[in-house]
Amino acid sequence: MTHKARVAEIAPDHYAISIHVPEFNLRFNHFLIKDDEPLLFHTGMKQMFPIVREAVARVIDPAMLRWISFSHFEADECGALNEWLALAPRAEPVCGLVGALVSVNDFAVRPARVLAHDEILKTGNYRLRFRQTPHVPHNWEAGLLFEEVTRTLLCSDLFSHGGDVEPVTESDLVDRAKCALIEGQKGPLANAYPYTSSTEAVLQGLADLQPKQLAIMHGSAFRGDAGSALRDLAATMREVLGPGMGSASP
């Protein structure tokens, strides 16, 4: 893979490492929090590991990573987990109990630090609150981290949108996400986002955290009233994916 990474500081000590893959016209983002105990959210795919490693090295010594986290068990979320664990001898995976039991503790070379719902992980100056979000965006074991000091929600595939876009935007992301959801329903990845009886409650709970930034896996990060954006996304997902629309439901 010959793609290059772009590094942008989206909040104090919070860096987006972005790789645009033109074959998919999609940007893959990995988020580094620089602190006493640095944290990487999204490992990237194994084939992207050398690119992401070099980008992390522009900010910190990659061997100093302490925590490696992600939302759910998927190649772009944690495919290179073991490569990072081999590079950083003190690093530990961070996930919820379901993720540890069904995937991570079998796959990873070191066991996970398991966080309970609303448990806080302190990295030094920053505090990350773990939220269990089953099937939001995907998978039973899904969970997200909310960094309370900068009020940044590491929100994985929520609000995903394509293109070689800017690192951070203050423009409305819901229209971008809605277009991507509608287009996705037409292609081979239809039903990638399940809509269950708990989807709206999960999204409303994230909105209640009153985030000011959204760190998104695919597309631009968002700065602004992220709580309102999450509530609008809940309405959009209900409209596009909800019961009666042909999408997955319990």
Image: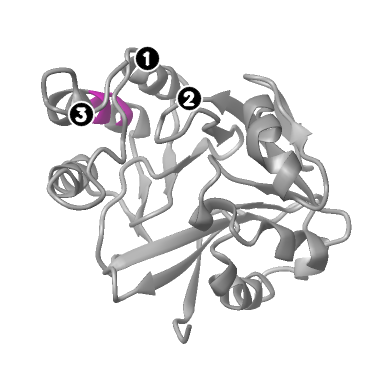
The residues tagged by marks 3 and 2 sit, at their Cα atoms, a distance apart of 17 Å
Residue 57 as seen in the image, left or right of residue 43: right
Report crowding for label 2: few under 14, some 14 to 19, many 20 or more residues within 10 A (C-alpha).
many
Residue 105 as seen in the image, left or right of residue 118: right
Q: Which residue is mark 1?
A: 198
Q: Amino acid at mark 3?
A: Ser
**Residue 33 visible from this viewpoint:** yes
Determine which quarter of the picture holds residue 22: bottom left
Looking at the rendering, the stretch of residues picked out in magenta corresponds to 230-234
Residue 10 against residue 53 in the figure, above or below: above
Residue 227 against residue 167 in the figure, above or below: above
What is the x, y in percent for residue 45?
54, 64
Mark 2 and mark 1 residues within 8 Å of each other at the beta carbon? yes
What is the x, y in percent for residue 185?
16, 43
Residue 185 as seen in the image, left or right of residue 170: left
Q: Which residue is mark 3?
A: 247
Disc nearer the start of the sequence (3/2) = 2
